[in-house]
Amino acid sequence: MVFTKMDNETMFGLTGAYLKVYQMLVNMDDEDGVDEELLKDTLDSITDAIEVKADGYKAVMDDLELKAAALDGEIQQALQYVDRIKRRKASLVRNVGRLKDDLATAMEQIGRDKIKTDKHTFWFQNSTSVKAPDDPMQLPPRYIKHKPSVDKKLLGKDLKAGVDVPNASLVTTKTLRMN
């Protein structure tokens, strides 16, 4: 879905203070930051009954969610562009490698370890690197890195079962749901 309305127009016919809140939120950039005080003052100025206020907030949220969803298409296009550029870069890097390999082969065929021209010097240099198996389990344990991570599913199950686990606890949060 491509969102074609202007930033100051809404899909849910917002008016008054709710439109002002919507415009503030849709036109601000996270990089520029939110004028929290102005936003809070605007929100505080809405004196509707809680039911009307809740419906107004929901309409603003729905409009903002539509705008966010519309950006998915732009994100996909950007990702495709980035993928194309990455493939092009990889192709160029491979081509540099091909030329380097071809030059190295030519130098080896004529038995030259070094070539000096007016512009450049080319030579072979020995280097040492580590070759390890793809499966690290083929190596002794001391050479294998392990990144510790928490098994939150098991931890939660044990905590719910009453197991005392130092430095861990169950935390209950309260989240507003709506439909």
Image (cartoon, rainbow, N blue to C red):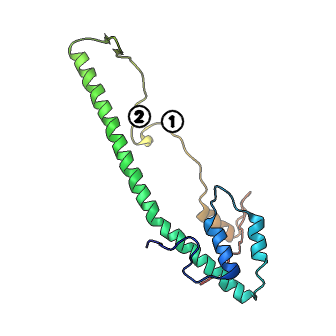
Q: Residue at x 62, y 60 (%)?
A: 29
Q: Dot 1: what SS?
A: helix
Check the picture and name the quadrant holding the N terminus.
bottom left
Q: How far apart are marks 1 and 2 (CA)?
A: 10 Å
Query: What label does residue 14 carry, if any?
Result: none
- Dots 1 and 2: beta carbons under 8 Å? yes
At a point 78% along the width and 66% down the height, the residue shown is: 37
Q: Mark 2 = which residue?
A: 132
Of residues 65 and 10, the one nearer the viewer is: 10
Residue 55 placement: quadrant:
bottom right
Above or below residue 10? Residue 110 is: above
Q: Read off the residue under disc 1.
A: 143
Give the side of residue 95 with respect to residue 44, left or right. left
Quarter of the figure that contains the C terminus: bottom right
Tell whether 22 sits left or right of 76.
Answer: right
Tell me residue 46's x, y (percent). 76, 81
x and y, in percent, of residue 160 in the image: 67, 71
Disc 1 residue type? Tyr
